[in-house]
Amino acid sequence: MTDRWALAPAEDGGAELAPLGPDGLPAGPVVREPDLAAAVRGRPEVARWVWRSTAEVYPRLLATGVRVERCYDIEDAETLLLGHEGRYGEPRSAAAALARLRGGPVPPDPPQRSAEPGAQSSLFEPQAVRLPLADLLEVYAEQQRRHDKAAHPERMRLLTAAESAGMLVAAEMNRAGLPWSADVHRRVLHELLGERYAGGGEPRRLAELADEVSAAFGRRVRPDLPADVVKAFAQAGIKVRSTRRWEIASLDHPAVAPLLEYKKLYRIWVAHGWSWLQDWVREGRFRPEFLAGGTVTGRWVTNGGGGLQIPKVIRRAVVADPGWRLVVADADQMEPRVLAAISRDPGLMEVAGRESDLYQAVSDRAFSGDRAQAKLAVLGAVYGQTSGDGLKNLAALRRRFPLAVAYVDDAARAGEEGRLVRTWLGRTCPPAAGAGEEPAEEAGIPVGADSDEAAQWMPGYASTDARARGRFARNFVVQGSAADWALLLLAALRQACAGKAAELVFFQHDEVIVHCPEEEAEAVVAAIREAAELAGRLTFGETPVRFPFTAAVVECYADAK
DNA sequence: AGTTTCGGCGCC
DNA sequence: AAAGGGCGCCGAAACT
């Protein structure tokens, strides 16, 4: 059965196509077709399309109503394979891969496109270098061989397949958009911020709060200017190093309350206010342009509109179409469950094998029932907390869950020493990411005072850069393996929704929203739970670890949880 | 005048 | 209480 075909769009709107054998090599002649979408639509038996770039091809297919079951994105795979091979930073275009294969000069990658408010999702990538199908097939065949050389070839194949699936999901979500009520949004803004004044200045409520802050200081103070606020506190006899919330909140001064309120509302105004609405919401949909695998850990990003940072109060504007519902579902305690799965710590797997509150179970075993302490300890272990109660809590965690803590400790040590660190499926951490990279001379620090070389002759010493790399690597294995799992979840959920009216419209690390007719909602909830467990088995193999979801069927996003 | 960095805070 | 991982976004400040 010929289930894999390769495809390369042509300049004239047509395409070159070729069937592939199970070995990934061409199994027939290259075919020329006059219409890209028609060529795909006419081959419904194809289970996987191999192409250079999903972002190049798939939006054009979706625009004509053509969906595909699976794909393989050659340039995304190239990125993942280069990373796995410890070759971060090498150009990752298909053209570059071909040049490396043939020993020619390697072209640099074209510059990244940046987001423009209101711009339609790109139908084309103008700067991208297209390759003839024959060249593409050469790169693909070589990538198949490179998978075989990976630390875990079968996991690496799963990773590239999963991220390609993620790119299909991203393209489909970009097309669907998140249902957004501009009326509700404007109502929320008015409730929070008051009237807008002509001229685009601060709305009424912000102006009032600025007046209150100024009155409390006894002089005119601009609360949106940190330097001004620091100076005002200094004149009041209070030294502050910054105007961050956590530093300001504990101060005893009448300006504190209106200042904090101002900062909260100011944030809404500038980041999700009227101009945001104008820029990003069209025809009842917010389209943030999701990018699968946009970060080194594999988490997604959105390009424009702050799609993954929608403030809780603004979520009231996310409203289902009439007769439709939003199924809002987020994974329960994803990080510790993933840590259990990757570390295979027996105690933590046992705890993560229950659907009930994992932090409560951890606290019953290691923290005398103090759930807050247990949660801090787990998150501290994952994020690399280095001081405060975190260390004491970490010790308690280590006694009860030694393999789990050892797993992240090993990752941290590998990061500090500059060794490669990988997620469960094989996504690889760039050697020096998160290190800050500031040249010591420019920062005014004598060279050698805090350098990596010092670690070699001072026992127990690690430079701040090395420690930062350690924290990054520690977090990377958990956050990144969670992203691995999330890709498989999305792929499975997407398959479950195929043939239904239900559409995935939002994804945020461990949370999904499906927009569907009311009568499909319960089936979607079940599909999410099944997809989560399937993703757990596919990603991590057979473990006792469960991946429960909290799901709500709502008309408005804000009504979930 | 245009571009880059910084400070702060939103989300996970 | 103290301040640790990943991002994007905005205006202001700091540059060229």
Image (cartoon, coloured by chain):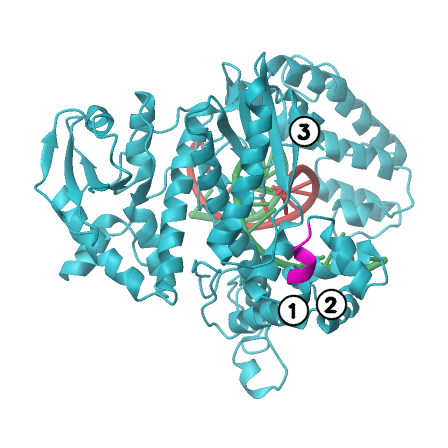
Chain colours: A cyan, B red, C green
Residue type at numbered disc 1: Val
Q: N-terminal of the two: label 3 or label 1?
A: 3
Left or right relative to A96: residue A186: right
The residue identified by callout 3 is A268
Q: Disc 1 or 2, which lies upstream in sequence?
A: 2
Q: Residues within 10 Å of mark 3 (few under 14, many from 20)?
A: many
Q: Position of residue A94 (x, y in %)?
A: 24, 49
Q: Quadrant of residue A456?
A: bottom right
Element at label 2: helix
Task: Check the image and report above or below for A417 versus A163.
Answer: below
Any part of residue A129 in sight: no
Residue at far left of view: A29
Q: Find out whether the residues at labels 1 and 2 contact each other: C-beta distance under 8 Å.
A: yes
Q: Residues within 10 Å of mark 1 (few under 14, many from 20)?
A: many
The magenta region covers A349-354
Q: Is residue A205 above or below residue A359?
A: above
Q: Main secondary structure of the magenta part?
A: helix
Q: Which mark is residue A405?
A: 1
Identify the amino acid type marked 2.
Answer: Leu
Q: Is residue A350 magenta?
A: yes
Disc number at residue A397?
A: 2
Q: Chain of mark 2?
A: A
